[in-house]
Image: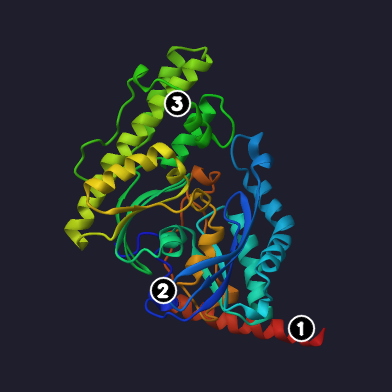
Amino acid sequence: MSLALHPGYTAAEGVLTGDATPMLVLGIETTCDETAAAVVERAATGAGRILSDVVLSQINEHAAFGGVVPEIAARAHVEALDTIIDKAMGKAQLGFAALDGIAVAAGPGLIGGVLVGLTTAKAIALVTEKPLIAVNHLEAHALTARLTHATTFPYCLFLASGGHTQIIAVLGVGNYVRLGTTLDDAIGEAFDKTGKLLGLGYPGGPEVEKQATAGNAARFALPRPMLGRAHADFSLSGLKTALRLEAERIAPLGEEDVRDLCAAFQQSIVEVIADRVRMGLKAFQERHGRPTALVAAGGVAANDAVRQALQRVAVEASTALVVPPPQLCTDNGRRRAAGAGAHRHARSRGACSLAAERGAGSGHGGAGGESRKRCGPARLQGRRAASRRDEGRIRQTMSNS
């Protein structure tokens, strides 16, 4: 597998692999429960600089339901996105004419929210006659370290969020090899569902971490799924079941019980991550040589215990650990959309007919599995022809109004 993150976006869509042209990109993010926009500048050296970053969280809207409600999320994006973009451009002190492109997270994500962002980005791109850059949500995670730390290729990526868990060899822009993945639940999903099971607040992951710091992990003997296996895959469903059975066995739960269960759960997750990432690094070195770094991305990378474990693994492998700032680890892509857009610059290729991609699993509110549909040459040619027709009709309508 040469492209683990999304088979539909290929080098033919305008990947920048060696061009160091300075550029300014507006990034738009609406894939889940945050409405966000950012302006990123890429210097001639290839280094990135965030000029503005505006984000509106929907946590309060979804808290009563214990998870993201897709319809509520989509409506909130519709109401807020125009204002968020105006604020981002204002903070950057730029007009649209100064931009070199409009980047938008086109999936995977909740389909309603993705459509809001993608449609808005298309409109801006058409009116301003700027290139539209469709950014894969997961590829943006993979490239964040290049924006924040100027990490050079090739590096090993550990991506763990509410909807995804993968170990990936990042060999270049658009060149990714999946070394390991989850066979069932994502790590972030397991954290959130554990929080919900134990009656903690939403989102559950940070609450589990908070409770775990004061708990006794040794009180409960939870399993370490896949520990010691020769591959780099994960499995979390059995761990969740084991925790639920322990909770039912000692119910009703007191505050100390909750703290101890959280500590035991987190300790199990941390040991599994360390073991699986070790195997991923081993596979990386066997296939691609020594990585320049071990990069952690996704919301789970904001967990302190996970970071400490990854640091130990990186030292063992004689490589550096690179973790973007916590606000860039969360699974929203506001800055990553702009950062990845500065690497993937698609010049007006099928802008009007670019399709949104559905999200992945319950980590994104149960939007369904990630699309596996490939965009072949014939389909791309049809999309580009449709785009030219659509652009002509839009310009004609504007000139007549």
Quadrant housing the N terminus: bottom left
* Closer-to-camera residue (316/135): 316
Helix, strand or loop status at disc 1: helix
Q: Which mark is residue 151?
A: none
Task: Tell me where residue 302 appears, x and y as whole percent.
Answer: 46, 44
Disc 1 marks a residue whose amino acid type is Met
Helix, strand or loop status at disc 2: loop
Residues at marks 2 and 1, CA–CA distance in whole angstroms: 33 Å
Labels 3 and 2: the sequence-earlier one: 3
Q: Which residue is mark 3?
A: 262
Residues at marks 3 and 2, CA–CA distance in whole angstroms: 47 Å
Please identify, in this view, whether the residue under mark 3 or under mark 2 is nearer the observer.
3
Badges 3 and 1: C-beta atoms under 8 Å apart? no
Disc 3 marks a residue whose amino acid type is Cys
Q: Residue furthest right?
A: 401
Point 37% across, 23% down: residue: 217
Labels 3 and 1: the sequence-earlier one: 3
Q: Which residue is mark 2?
A: 376
Task: Tell me where residue 344 appears, x and y as whole percent.
Answer: 46, 73
Horizontally, residue 169 falls left or right of residue 11, namely left
Q: Which residue is mark 1?
A: 398
Badges 3 and 2: C-beta atoms under 8 Å apart? no
Point 42% across, 62% down: residue: 143
Please identify, in this view, whether the residue under mark 3 or under mark 1 is nearer the observer.
3
Task: Tell me where residue 256 appears, x and y as whole percent.
Answer: 49, 16
